Amino acid sequence: MSEIIAVKDLSKVFGSFTAVQAVNFTVLEGQVFGFLGPNGAGKTTTIKMLTTLLAPSGGSIRVNGHDPVSEKDLVRKSFGIVFQDSSLDDELTAFENMEFHGVLYGVPAKERREEIDRLLRFVELADRKNNFVKEYSGGMKRRLEIARALLHHPKILFLDEPTLGLDPQTRNHIWSYLKSLTSAGRMTVFFTTHYMEEAERTADHVAIIDQGRIVASGSPADLRKLASAASLEEAFIALTGKNIRDEDASSQDRMRQASRVWRRKR
């Protein structure tokens, strides 16, 4: 398998604070790549650099062979993304949110309508497609965002806490479908999660970031062995420590702002 994401010596500095420090990793085509870390570890900042929302302070990135700084449009065409915070338009229906996304990505009308119907059936929202999103529950919005991110057949799907608020049945349903796409080589998944069991079950490869640095990388089995742990959760705690972390409010605000900027740019 060839590399679809390549990150070398990546850094990001905000004033006197270094959020990401000389990070290196690669993601292979068709891989499910778990990017894990405590709150405030640098996960979201890294994702924003990979998806053109932040310019790096140093280092280099290639996403599907393109530079997110100098080739923004080519990079954006390569991926779909589901943010932590909703980026849906609550004043539109589910169908209208999907339709708008498909038009922005240039999906032909006939194919767009067929894919919208198929994906809404997949996330079990077909019977609610004409309802305004503001009437949806949090779980329904999450399912709609995942369906929307898949509409233009991205080569890479970025998922930032994708199954937050979903019940186990829906979580398993979505991951089963995503794994079928990656196993067929049609898509690569790059995701963050705080559900260690989810990462252990679904990820082919895991990188753990803490305090802006990659502290371990390998398969879930490799990380369990490295930390002499019985589970990925135990390995994660052993590698990052037991102290409770607080994600600072400014970091959360930056992510919400990035989500809004992304929708405007599209």
Image: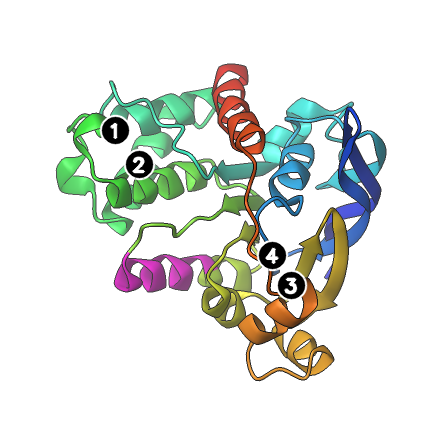
Q: Tell me which label, 4 or 1, sits earlier in the chain.
A: 4
Tell me the quarter of the picture where residue 132 sits. Answer: top left
Q: Residues within 10 Å of mark 3 (few under 14, many from 20)?
A: many
Q: Which residues are magenta?
A: 167-178
User: Any magenta on residue 170?
Assistant: yes
Q: Nearer the viewer, mark 4 or mark 2?
A: 4
Q: Which residue occupies 47% across, 70% down? A: 197
Residue 240's x, y, as percent?
Answer: 67, 62
Q: Label 2's element?
A: helix
In the rendered structure, which amino acid carries the disc numbered 4?
Leu
Q: Nearer the viewer, mark 2 or mark 1?
A: 1
Tell me the quarter of the picture where residue 102 sits. Answer: top left
Q: Which mark is residue 206?
A: 3
| Circles 2 and 1 in contact, beta carbons < 8 Å | yes
| Circles 4 and 3 in contact, beta carbons < 8 Å | yes
Q: CA distance from mark 4 to mark 1?
A: 33 Å
Residue 66's x, y, as percent?
Answer: 75, 34
| Circles 4 and 1 in contact, beta carbons < 8 Å | no
Q: On the rendered image, what quadrant is the N terminus found in?
A: bottom right
Query: Which residue is tagged 4?
Result: 36
In the rendered structure, which amino acid carries the disc numbered 2?
Ile
In the rendered structure, which amino acid carries the disc numbered 3?
Val
Query: Which residue is tagged 2?
Result: 116
Task: In the rendered view, tell whether residue 252 sits above or below residue 73.
Answer: below
